[in-house]
Image (spheres, rainbow, N blue to C red):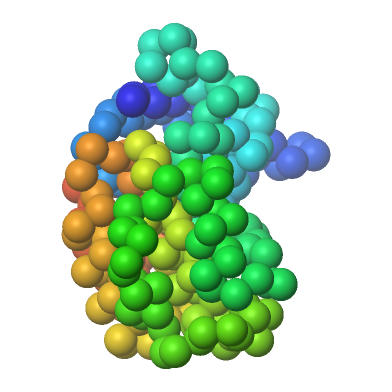
Amino acid sequence: MNIALENIGKRYNKEWIFRGVSAEIESNSYWVIKGSNGSGKSTFLKIVSGFGIPTEGRIIVDQGKYDLTQLYKSISISAPYVDIPEEFTLDELVKFHSGFKGLKISENEDLNSAFNLPDVTGKLIKDYSSGMKQRVKLGLAIYSETPVLLLDEPLSNLDEKGMEWYQSIIKVNMRDRIILVCSNNFEKEFFFCEKEINIENHK
């Protein structure tokens, strides 16, 4: 899969959040989207994911051969504004998620270990700590068998052990994917990225 951004811009009322963002994003490429809080990183990621619509410019997927209405099937995302169903246990949530997108987790694999969690057997996700919920979000997104992975400030609410887990599962699940990471210049979030878009440069 490849994604072409052609002069993407987003405006709210009369104020431009960003303008003139162009990039050729190909499979096996890893990008960090940098910018301070409120600079438009999350808005940009929503547009790439199809959750938002640009005010100007266009997005072309696979030279226009891809059905954009089906784009969601090819994307997994972890972001503060994306919620997970909290009335499930982890086992129930994984089964539910797998009905929409395959997961790179074997049936016999211990889910507590895969998601870097203590023993949460029978515990509802609504009773998890914020750090535990963040690991569930990240795990579902990173383990999903999708060609596009979008991560918005992935290390928020994670302790040092959680950060190490994130880095380890990214390393083994990055092949043959496009990965975009929004970050406030926190290198541990985008240590593997080779290319950069700085939203601050598109005002």
Q: Residue at 55% of width from left, 35% of height from top?
A: 72
In which quadrant is the N terminus drawn?
top left
Which residue is at the front of the view, 193 or 36? 193
- Residue 31's x, y, as percent? 31, 46
Q: Residue at 54% of width from left, 16% of height from top?
A: 67
Q: Residue at 32% of width from left, 39% of height from top?
A: 178
In the picture, residue 160 is in which quadrant?
bottom left
Which residue is at the front of the view, 42 or 18? 42
Q: Residue at 30% of width from left, 86% of height from top?
A: 161
Please give the count of numbered marks on the rendered protein. 0
- Residue 168's x, y, as percent? 22, 69
The reply, left or right, for residue 138 in relation to residue 106 is right
Which residue is at the front of the view, 168 or 202? 168
Which residue is at the front of the view, 137 or 184? 137
Q: Is residue 12 visible?
A: yes
Against 29, residue 180 (above or below) is below
Against 30, residue 115 (above or below) is below
Q: Residue furthest front?
A: 108
Q: Residue furthest right?
A: 13
Q: Is residue 202 visible?
A: no
The reply, left or right, for residue 22 in relation to residue 106 is right
- Residue 19's x, y, as percent? 54, 33
- Residue 27's x, y, as percent? 26, 32
